[in-house]
């Protein structure tokens, strides 16, 4: 009874007169309602005892009856039961009976009527059934929405019947829809027989049901007939918009979405908004048609079939601008990029058109890139909001979705530099293709960063251009999920599917998406279900693989024509106005085409997506070609060292083991010495003092994989209480960001690359947990970091810290694959540069595509990090960092090597007895990194300090030809050999040998001492490791080892 009372109490009442007044136009007199206080189905006039004066009494009787039906007179019991059962007017009330024979018969009939009528249980069950029905539409209504502009149903994966219907009936053309699940959910009322799923019948369609608080379909009406409930649910969820949101576990967010899509009449547009939409469609469509007319045989990856993308993006930008956003950063694949550049970013049309001229000469150094890969940066007035807006479209390679984390990183950086901690000023928009969105793992990695404290951009609007095909691959072969957007569910991002042939529905969805991002600062996905009128590109023939689909597409009327006809029929515009809009834009294109013929030189720098105002000269050149000393005053070194070895927060309890580490640091500072961790600390701290933001990111970087860094201290007694001493160095220092990343390399490195794009005045570092993990981010390295400046005239100073070294730890955690980075260096091994050139070392750095170093001392690591910022330009820096050297007693540097006047040493020459008597040296060993310490230990053990000289190459690329020539000339009688701990087909040998030979004009051979060629980077057996080590050390110090090859 308690459960029954509770359910009944939740059913808010309507009087019979209210019900009749509201719905008299929709149904006959008998209307079923559900009330707690008044629950009368019949009009008041039909019951003789009902009047205004007795209503309070009736209410009291009804409440008592709800508590206990036996507590009221039998006549009231019969009345209330009949009323709740929907008895017709005048029949619910049974007058008191006399004792006559006829009265007794009537009483028996009444008793049977009472027993036959449903009770309150039925009332509650029906009401809950309607609530379940409403929820079913909210959850699964999108599955029967009319999303496909081609009007083609979905093919199942086999020929089995689908819910009683054969595939051929559903899909006569055999073409796929946006949703791979072709079944109609059993709980969606697609026909009246589906009512039985809820225990309802066709006769219930005109009964009135109170609406739950989890729906807005009633508007101002608290109750509706079942027929109207179903109609409004179908209008909200089963038309040209399909909404996926019920997986979101936040009630407020769900309610917000329901209100946006369920409220009756909410999707309304003014005539002015419709005219603006038409004008934008004209520009989008006629731009593609103009390119097709002028360059019909050129690839341009046009937007035909999804022309609505342009007004969609402009709507998102308009709404965001109105909400206070003044900087939008965008990333997109090649399809539609030229149209976006022209009609969203507002790139000059002549600059786009001249790209099609095959005679255009390149004015910039480097390779350049295809026109549909280039980016752009532009600041303009938003005409709708009359506010300034900055738009940046990030350049990207053909690797679909690779730009996603780059855009996120750049957005995060712009938010950081303008103090936008909530994402209210800077936002990102990412465009995707349907096949790539479902197929590329980087999409998930990027989503996974979206709500992490050091990576969140406070919401991204994702727009999927859903062609319903990937190149030539059907969706059924390209994904296992029903929609290409299902990956977004992992972060509770709402997904709005929309038929792209309904421009007003698209605009509404884009408005809601922009409002969602502004309200909740979380990701949202707009799935533009469209088609691709041409093949993958304009030269491709799609009929080879999708003949039936493209027969349908050939019949498809363009969306511009459809919408123009609609507005003309509505009287919003007339035909002459529409044609004038077309003529006006065609004239703009023709005039721009004429001007484009005057362009003779292509300036890629005009397509720069991330300019650095004030850093270069006006013509984009460095302000100097020198680099100041990277040393520091001793008091600065001491101050940083003292902070690094202390806890600058009171009442903060650190781990006992960490106390010993800090004590060791204090002793090093007292002795005017640094180890690896302290050298890094001093480089970072000194740059912070100079106003340079330092950001270190990667897996477990806060402590350091090898427990050497400890940049974040944790209170051992208070949960989540931390301290970053680096942020307590100076009163007005720049902030230091150190953040453990998710277990992602591709996504996180892309993010940090994007962060480094935003400003040259920041040291942005990504550290791999182990060096070989960089291969998980190979796409970012190969497509962005290595060739980025050559392709897009875009400098970047990102630093990669890659732990590397053969320590006997097996093949997986040994090699950072230096051979790959060196192979991609752009210097010529067979050409000796002009060594007399002024500032030769700086010129080399300026000309290279990246810098590759393997430091053997903490001091040199300190210098190379500071040099990265003090250089007058920016280049990526690849650092092969050590593991065992982090605690090696000989891997120490005195303060004297870090004082003013000191620099990074590209080469560290021999400074022992061999250097004192160079003529007596019989072998000159060149090496890099950790193996130096193995060599010096072996040389000392063999007492060969005067016979063998060891020179360390600290900077591998650009190759230090000048310094190595001096070293080779210094030891005229010495054999030259390269020694490395890596296998011969790996490591540095293939890079170093030809350059050394060029350095000495091929006067001598360059011998090899190291491990033999192998498939794996290292052995997994400790004994084998040591055996290999001793073998190549024997070769290095056996002065007769190479005579047999002479």
Image (cartoon, rainbow, N blue to C red):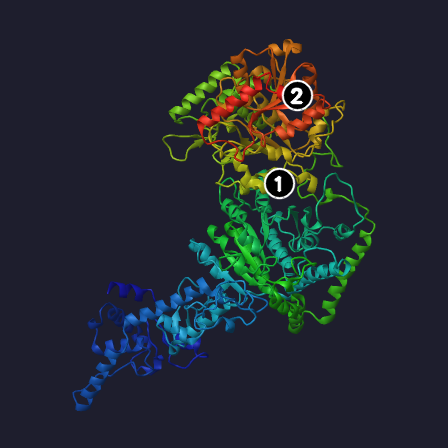
Instruction: Please tell me whether mark 2 sits on a helix, a strand or a loop.
Output: loop
Q: Is residue 374 visible?
A: yes
Q: Nearer the viewer, residue 358 or 206?
A: 358
Q: Nearer the viewer, residue 448 or 279?
A: 448
Disc nearest the viewer among 1 and 2 = 2
- Find the distance from the CA under tag 1 to the CA under tag 2: 39 Å
Q: Is residue 869 visible?
A: no
Query: Which residue carries the number 2 mark?
Result: 1046
Query: Which residue carries the number 1 mark?
Result: 782
Q: Position of residue 435 (x, y in %)?
A: 56, 55
762 left or right of 208 in image? right
Contact check, label 1 and label 2, Cβ < 8 Å: no
N-terminal of the pair, mark 1 or mark 2, is 1
Q: Nearer the viewer, residue 396 or 138?
A: 396
Callout 1 crowding tier (Cα within 10 Å): few <14, some 14–19, many ≥20: some
Residue occupying image coordinates x 54% and y 43%: 747
Q: Position of residue 388 (x, y in %)?
A: 66, 48
75 left or right of 167 in image? left
The quadrant of the picture occupied by the N terminus is: bottom left
Q: Position of residue 680 (x, y in %)?
A: 54, 25
Callout 2 crowding tier (Cα within 10 Å): few <14, some 14–19, many ≥20: few
Q: From this view, report whether residue 619 is shown above or below residue 184.
A: above
Instruction: Please tell me whether mark 1 sits on a helix, a strand or a loop.
Output: helix
Where residue 466 sits, quadrant-wise, is: bottom right
């Amino acid at each position: 009874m308690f459960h029954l009372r509770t359910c009944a109490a939740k059913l808010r009442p309507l009087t019979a007169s209210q019900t009749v007044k509201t719905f008299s136009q929709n149904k006959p007199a008998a209307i079923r309602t559900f009330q707690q206080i008044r629950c009368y189905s019949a009009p008041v006039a039909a019951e003789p005892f009902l009047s205004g004066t007795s209503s309070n009494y009736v209410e009291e009787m009804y409440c008592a009856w709800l508590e206990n039906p036996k507590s009221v007179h039998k006549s009231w019991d019969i009345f209330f039961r009949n009323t709740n059962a929907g008895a017709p007017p005048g029949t619910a009330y049974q007058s008191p009976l006399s004792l006559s024979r006829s009265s007794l018969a009537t009483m028996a009939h009444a008793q049977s009527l009472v027993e036959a009528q449903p009770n309150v249980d039925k009332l509650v069950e029906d009401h809950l059934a309607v609530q379940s029905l409403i929820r079913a539409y909210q959850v699964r209504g999108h599955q029967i929405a009319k999303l496909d502009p081609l009007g083609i149903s979905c093919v199942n994966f086999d020929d089995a019947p689908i819910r009683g219907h054969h595939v051929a009936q559903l899909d006569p053309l055999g073409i796929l829809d946006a949703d791979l699940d072709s079944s109609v959910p059993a709980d969606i009322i697609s026909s009246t027989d589906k009512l039985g799923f809820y225990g309802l019948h066709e006769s219930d369609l005109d009964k009135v049901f109170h609406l739950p608080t989890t729906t807005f379909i009633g508007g101002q009406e608290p109750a509706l007939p079942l027929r109207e409930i179903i109609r409004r649910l179908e209008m909200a969820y089963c038309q040209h918009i399909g909404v996926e949101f019920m997986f979101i576990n936040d009630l407020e967010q769900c309610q917000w979405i329901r209100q946006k899509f369920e409220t009756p009449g909410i999707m309304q547009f003014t005539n002015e908004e419709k005219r603006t939409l038409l004008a934008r469609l004209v520009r989008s469509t006629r731009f593609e048609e103009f390119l097709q007319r002028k360059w019909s045989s050129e690839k341009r990856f046009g937007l035909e079939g999804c022309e609505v993308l342009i007004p969609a993006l402009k709507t998102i930008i308009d709404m965001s601008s109105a909400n206070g956003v003044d900087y939008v950063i965008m990333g997109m694949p090649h399809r539609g990029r030229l149209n976006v550049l022209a009609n969203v970013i507002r790139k000059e049309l002549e600059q786009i058109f001249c790209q099609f001229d095959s005679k255009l000469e390149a004015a910039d150094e480097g390779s350049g890139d295809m026109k549909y890969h280039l980016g752009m940066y532009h600041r303009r007035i938003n005409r709708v909001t009359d506010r300034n807006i900055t738009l940046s479209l990030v350049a990207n390679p053909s690797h679909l979705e690779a730009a996603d984390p780059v855009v996120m990183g750049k957005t995060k950086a712009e938010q950081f530099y303008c103090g936008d901690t909530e994402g209210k000023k800077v936002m990102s928009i990412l465009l995707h293709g349907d096949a790539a969105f479902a197929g590329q793992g980087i999409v998930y990695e990027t989503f996974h960063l979206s709500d992490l404290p050091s990576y969140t951009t406070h919401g991204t609007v994702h727009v999927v251009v859903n062609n319903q095909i990937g190149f030539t691959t059907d969706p059924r072969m390209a994904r296992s999920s029903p929609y290409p957007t299902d990956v977004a569910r992992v972060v509770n991002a709402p997904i709005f599917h929309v038929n792209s042939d309904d421009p007003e529905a698209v605009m509404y969805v884009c408005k809601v998406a922009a409002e969602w991002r502004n309200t909740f600062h979380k990701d949202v996905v707009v799935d533009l279900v469209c088609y691709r009128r041409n093949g993958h590109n304009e030269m491709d023939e799609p009929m080879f693989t999708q003949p039936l689909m493209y027969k349908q597409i050939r019949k498809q009327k363009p969306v511009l024509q459809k919408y123009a006809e609609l507005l003309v029929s509505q009287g919003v515009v007339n035909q002459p106005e529409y044609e004038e809009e077309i003529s006006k834009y065609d004239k703009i294109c023709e005039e721009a085409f004429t001007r484009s013929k005057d362009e003779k030189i292509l300036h890629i720098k005009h397509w720069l997506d991330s300019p650095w105002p004030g850093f270069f000269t006006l013509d984009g050149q460095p302000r100097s070609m020198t680099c100041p000393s990277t040393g520091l005053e001793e008091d600065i070194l001491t101050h940083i060292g003292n902070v690094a070895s202390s806890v600058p927060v009171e009442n903060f309890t650190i781990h006992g083991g960490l106390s010993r580490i800090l004590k060791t640091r204090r002793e090093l500072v007292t002795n005017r010495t640094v180890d690896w961790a302290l050298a890094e600390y001093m480089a970072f701290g000194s740059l912070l003092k100079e106003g340079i933001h330092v950001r270190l990111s990667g897996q477990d970087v806060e402590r350091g994989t090898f427990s050497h860094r400890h940049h974040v201290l944790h209170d051992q007694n208070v949960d989540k209480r931390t301290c970053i001493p680096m942020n307590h160095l100076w009163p007005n220092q720049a902030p230091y960001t150190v953040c453990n990343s998710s277990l992602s390399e591709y996504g996180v490195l892309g993010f940090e690359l994007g962060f480094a794009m935003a400003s040259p005045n920041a040291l942005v570092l990504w550290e791999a947990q182990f060096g070989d993990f960089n291969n998980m981010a190979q796409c970012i390295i190969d497509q962005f970091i290595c060739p980025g400046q050559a392709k897009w005239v875009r400098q970047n100073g990102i630093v990669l810290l890659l732990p590397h070294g053969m320590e006997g730890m097996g093949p997986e955690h040994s090699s950072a694959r230096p051979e790959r980075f060196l192979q991609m260096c752009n210097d010529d091994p067979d050409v000796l540069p002009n060594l007399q050139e002024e500032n030769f070392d700086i010129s080399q750095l300026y000309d290279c595509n990246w810098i590759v170093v393997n430091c053997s001392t903490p001091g040199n690591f300190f210098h190379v990090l500071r040099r990265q910022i003090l250089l007058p330009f920016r280049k990526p820096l690849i650092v092969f960092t050590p593991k065992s050297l982090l605690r090696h007693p000989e891997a120490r540097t005195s303060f004297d090597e870090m004082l003013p006047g000191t620099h990074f040493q590209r080469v560290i020459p021999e400074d022992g007895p061999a250097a004192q008597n160079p003529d007596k040296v019989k072998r000159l060993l060149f090496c890099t990194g950790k193996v130096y310490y193995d060599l010096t230990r072996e040389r000392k053990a063999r007492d060969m300090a005067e016979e063998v000289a060891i020179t360390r190459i600290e900077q591998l690329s650009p190759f230090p030809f000048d310094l190595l020539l001096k070293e080779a000339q210094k030891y005229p009688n010495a054999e030259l050999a390269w020694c490395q701990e890596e296998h011969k087909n790996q490591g540095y040998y293939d890079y170093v040998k030809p350059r050394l030979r060029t350095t000495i004009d091929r006067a001598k051979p360059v011998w090899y001492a190291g491990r033999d060629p192998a498939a794996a980077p290292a052995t997994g057996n400790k004994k084998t490791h040591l055996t290999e080590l001793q073998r190549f050390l024997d070769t290095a110090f056996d002065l007769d080892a190479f005579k047999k090859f002479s």
